[in-house]
Image: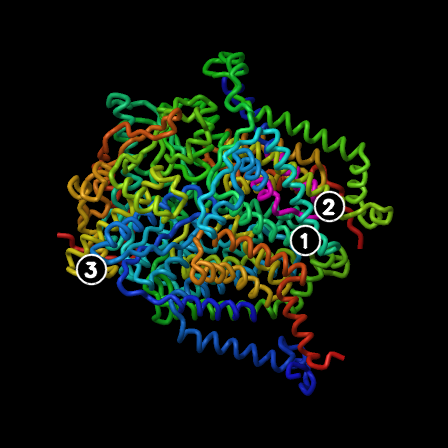
Amino acid sequence: MKLSKLALVAAAAITAASPILAGELVFPSLSYRTGPYAANGTPVADGFADYFTLLNERDGGIGGVMTKVIECETGYSTEKGVECYESTKGEGSLVYMPLSTGITYQLIPKVTADDIPMLTTGYGRTSAANGAVFSNVFNFPANYWQGASVAVNHILDQENGDIKGKTIALLYHNSAYGKEPIRTLEALAEKHGFDLTLLPVDHPGQEQKSQWLQIRRERPDYVVMWGWGVMNQVAIQEAANIKFPMDKFIGIWWSGSENDVIPAGAAADGYKALTFHAVGTDFPVFEDIQKYVVDAGKAAGTGENVGTVLYNRGMYGAMLAAEAAKVAQKMHGVAEITPSQMRDGLENLVMNDEIAAAIGFGGFGPNFEVSCANHGGPGLAAVQQWDAANQKWNLITDFMAPDMDVIQPLIDEDSAAYAAENNITPRDCN
Amino acid sequence: MSADFYYTIEVIINGLMTGVLYSLVALGFVLIFKASGVFNYAQGVMALFAALTLVGLQNGQIPFAPLINSIFGTNLSTFGWTLPTVVAIVLALGVMVLFAYLVERYILRYLVGQDPVILFMATIGLAYFMEGFGDLMWGADIKKLDVGLPQGGNVWLESATEGWAEGFYGFYIDNLDIWATFIAVVLVIGLMVFSQYTKTGRALRAVADDNQAAMSVGISLRAIWVIVWSLAGFVALVAGTMWGAKSGVQFSLSLIALKALPVLMLGGFTSIPGAIVGGMIIGVGEKLFEYSIGPMIGGATENWFAYVLALLFLVFRPQGLFGEKIIERV
Amino acid sequence: MFYREAGDFKTSYAADSQTFPIRLDRYGYYTTLAIAFLFVPLVISDYWANALLLPFLIWAIASLGLNILSGYCGQISLGTGGFMAVGAYSSYKLMTAFPDLNLFIVILLSGVITAAVGVLFGLPSLRIKGFYLAVATLAAQFFLVWLFNKVPWFYNYSASGQISVPTRSVFGYEVTGAEANSEAKYLFILVIVVLLAYIARNLTRGRIGRSWMAIRDMDIAAEIIGVNPLLTKLTAFAISSFYIGIAGALFFSVYLGAVEVGEAFGIQKSFLVQFMIIIGGLGSIFGSFIGAAFMVMMPVLLKNIMVGQLGWATDIAAHFELVIIGGLIILFLILEPHGLAQLWRLTKEKLRLWPFPH
């Protein structure tokens, strides 16, 4: 007991030693730079931190108030996520972006009770798009069900609009995250008349021989992948090994980073993945990142990953949060906003060409508007394709809309079930 | 013969090859357990560390670069040269030998004669240490490992067997798996020859048999431990290279140890041939089950079925297939 | 000088065989309880509860359970995560199927269900021994996780397979759900922990505990002197799983509130609890507590020092955390191979003689 008491005393000293500093907008970053998904977590966290560094260096913060990023290492573990949430929420954290489906589910009731908003860009609980039930959770610009639908739309485009009788295999991480698209794909299969084959891969996904032998045997026309971490690299390698046509292999946005394709080398050429933001560095904001952050030696990482898919995603998330903070400042007429005001900002966020161009993000992401009823945005996503020779991703489509006729009823059903289970009366959004 | 028949054969062959890959990991456990009775929890992390070291040396990465950068504010990453694969392998092996020496010098030496569970726990500590240390030294990003082994399906076999039956696309066997099998066979024969016909090998077996008696005839227990851990380090390097070539070198590599556990238990903790045969049984068993029963019950059965299979064997042979007979006396 | 038996006279057998024969120990124990029940709830914050105390108490229950099986009965188990999942999913199903059932009863029943599952997977222990037994429990671990992931009935057919706890209260205070305040959660778990620790302590020094230890020390010899190995091993599995099931139920319902089986109850949890009892001390109730404290609080403490105090980058700090924890485990082992509990015992032995060691 001696030791643990000592530990408690020391921990007390430490938690008490960081007072809330006035005059800062606090953005916690629940990142993971260790553990099985470190390679994916690191660039996202770097992009997130670098964008706020840029705002501080270039603009003097947001609306004249400096920003501060508190990074907390979760290692993708739910329990560490709780610890991070509890240790940062007292510091005036404005919005949580936990970057993990498990932690998101965990935090949904907590942030609602504490009235802090949570923004899950492209992950988390899909039915949180229903703002009437999930008042504090936002999952714009796109969610998994919309991703599944966009993937099927892309396949429809490839097949000239008719995929009746075709087979689509879903290769998925056997977890909450991987199971998300199943229901949507089943509904779409019914609508478009294609066959759906489900191929679960257990964590961590180092061994996928059975799944790929099955794909080789049954020759599905398309393979859609919901993978994460090592599963992506192995899947792409195995697909190359059995000579599965790479342009018929489509990953979700979390299966489409440089990390996933580079280990497979030239064989990965032509692999496709969804994305809800642009790729590369051909945007004005990257010049500023280079000038104010990387060259000034203030980058969170080595600066090498600027412009990679996951770095851009982290930066895009940071930009959305920053823009929402601006909206909140304008709405409430104060510079130092509270989490509750930040929530209003997120709910009234508008992204259009004009706003995006003003901050150097012109054409980087789709245009969308958030509203009280719709916390998910329209769910536009594009398809990117890997060019192994030049080691870069290229966008090959515009941002496409998902089939909301199929998805909206699913969202309504799932959120209604959540509301009933937790005695939530949906807000009146009119 | 119908296509189904050939496909079943294909699944069995692939199962055998995957099993060999599991055995490669299991071998490291067996070596250490046999000589010192230590269940080395750190074996998986050792494979990761060995592979990281190999890639790091190959690419001329500067060790501890992120740490140095954050302390001194420098911006180091690589030395700017790349080493030939063979040189890198030899150097990585050297690092593993040094590691074995350090483990003996700073951990095992103080724990001679303790309970197995205490030695097991020491390896837990070691695993934690190595995991953090490896990340600090080489960084946590995914690295591509290329040691020149061919990858992809064997084209010759595929085209030769295509069309044997209606709807059969020819046998698919990964070239890397063929190589892995070849290397594993060479490794096992090498280890057997080493332990049967060399002086050190005989000393190893003597220690495994009865370390008190071995010491009394003048065999240095410490030297033996360093040798065994070096051998295990070598096996870890081979296993890490094979698996790293499939998936890139990254943290998840250390989790392959989990696939080695059922193999170990099935084959027996003390038998080198047991590790190979056990691996093959597990490999074939889990692949066949996933192929035949899997689709009916929702798939992803391989992880648990491996253990159930091992359990079935153990019920009939509680010491593993090739394990030494447990003789209990009061 | 103060810590000794001298002058502490026992006049009955009951007094002689009590848990804390030394007065100072006894007072220390009462004081700890008093602080835990009366003082801590007054000062507890969300951070303290959710980041440190709740996980510590819950893992302490799991360690107690595993310690009964491994430490007292000598049966190795790497299925703790899977059994915790049984507890968690039982509590979820019970809570959603019978909304009016008292939470104490839900938790208790979850433990009972887990005990039944534990006995089932304990059956091979009659035939398989030592390290090889781990295979049976590992089969349980992987099979149970797969089962809860695969069969939609267990997670009430939700889209992703996550389960979320509904709000329940005990004596009018909400204990589960996001609105529950930390004091209520903490006290609820503390009551269970104290009860379970008390039961464990008395079980292990009674007839049943002695038969467990006889089996552990040498099963054949125990059989010869009349200990029934079937009954003894299976009771150990049952009681151990009962504890672990309760830990799992609390872990899900009170601590996390939402879990996904693969992430929350994976194999790494089985290893974690195994580490806790080995580090704390096999066959020691107190060891279960320090082991849990070490594994739960050490990382948080190190993180707070390195990131909060020294301002290091989080990734370097996280890597160092592993290096330091690994190094500490090895160091403790070299200093005292039988766990922290033994270290504590030795300190007490020395204290008894201090300051006159001769």
Task: Tell us which disc is closer to us: 2 or 1.
Answer: 1
Q: Is residue C113 above or below residue A148?
A: below
Residue at disc 2, secondary structure: helix
Magenta stretch, residue numbers = B22-48
Residue plotted at (31% across, 29% down): A394
Specify whether residue B266 is in view. no
Q: Is residue C31 above or below residue A269?
A: below
Quarter of the figure with residue B209: top right
Residue plotted at (27% across, 34% down): A282
Specify whether residue B59 is in view. yes
Asked if the residues shown at circle 3 and circle 2 are in contact, with their CB atoms under 8 angstroms apart, the answer is no
Q: Which residue is mark 2?
A: B225
Residue plotted at (67% across, 85% down): C8
In-front residue for pair C317/B113: C317
Q: Which residue is mark 1?
A: B106
Q: On the rendered image, what quadrant is the N terminus of chain A found in?
A: bottom right
Q: How is the image coloured?
A: rainbow
At label 3, the amino acid type is Ala
Q: Chain of mark 1?
A: B
Give percent across and percent down for residue C139.
56, 44
At label 2, the amino acid type is Trp
Residue at disc 3, secondary structure: loop
Membership of A58 in magenta stretch: no
Most common SS among magenta residues: helix
